[in-house]
Amino acid sequence: MSYSRSSFHDDEFHDVVEGLAEADALAVLLRGHLWIEVLLEQVARTRLARPDAIDWSRARFEHKLSIAEAVDGITPDLSAAVRDLNRLRNRLAHDLRYSVSEDDLKMLIGRVKDDRIRSAIDQLAEPQLEIARTLAAARLRGDEIEFSHGAEWMDRALTPARAYLFSFVVATVRELGITYALDSLPGRAPDDATFVDLLDQTLRRVTGGLFGLNVPFSR
């Protein structure tokens, strides 16, 4: 599965959502990094007077992040956390033995000061962390673990680091998706219901159905 660095089609967004759902920490890092990069560019484009004056095909992740922050498309604290995510991804690119640690992710998430975003991260992370800790304790006791259909991936992929990383990526995608959806609406909607409907459609499209208005991703 390959993607353009500058754009996704709707079905590709859905593919990423499906890929993230059962991915281990390294796969979440790689796919989540690419997804965030695409949304950073889209957010920046909607806020620039002449976005095509930039050769986006040559722009690196850190350049897109800086531009998005410069046009107030991402808050400075979330930008700092995303910059840390980029460093983790670059470490992986240069050292195949590297694995993301729980401490790496706690430090990264600690950069996010917005209570609303932190709350979203915590709500996504806590159920996964509880399961990961339960599995770890069961393994230490030597218990035989049975997984229901559809939950087998947890035995292979679910760790505290994965829980934190997945939750950060999803919360960041939600934040950038909302910003892009609000910025990209054409002109003024004829009524509030139409405005909400257009906003919901755009948010669902750029998050691959991960989020709609007041409909969080629960997996």
Image (tube, rainbow, N blue to C red):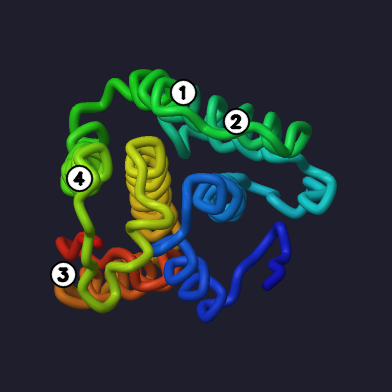
The amino acid pointed to by label 3 is: Asp
Q: Of discs 4 and 1, which sits in the foreground?
A: 4
Name the residue tied to disc 2.
88
Q: Amino acid at mark 4?
A: Ala
Quarter that holds the N terminus: bottom right
Badge 2: residue crowd in 10 Å (few <14, some 14–19, many ≥20): many
In the image, what residue type sits under mark 2? Leu
Asked which secondary structure carries label 1, the reply is helix
Q: Which residue is mark 3?
A: 192
**x and y, in percent, of residue 94 in the image:** 78, 33
Compare marks 4 and 3 and give the one earlier in the sequence.
Answer: 4
Q: Position of residue 82 (x, y in %)?
A: 51, 32
Above or below: residue 53 compared with residue 111: below
**Vertical relation: 190 (above or below) 127:** below
Q: Secondary structure at mark 4?
A: helix
Examine the rendered structure and indicate whether residue 72 appears above or below residue 30: above
For label 4, the residue is 138
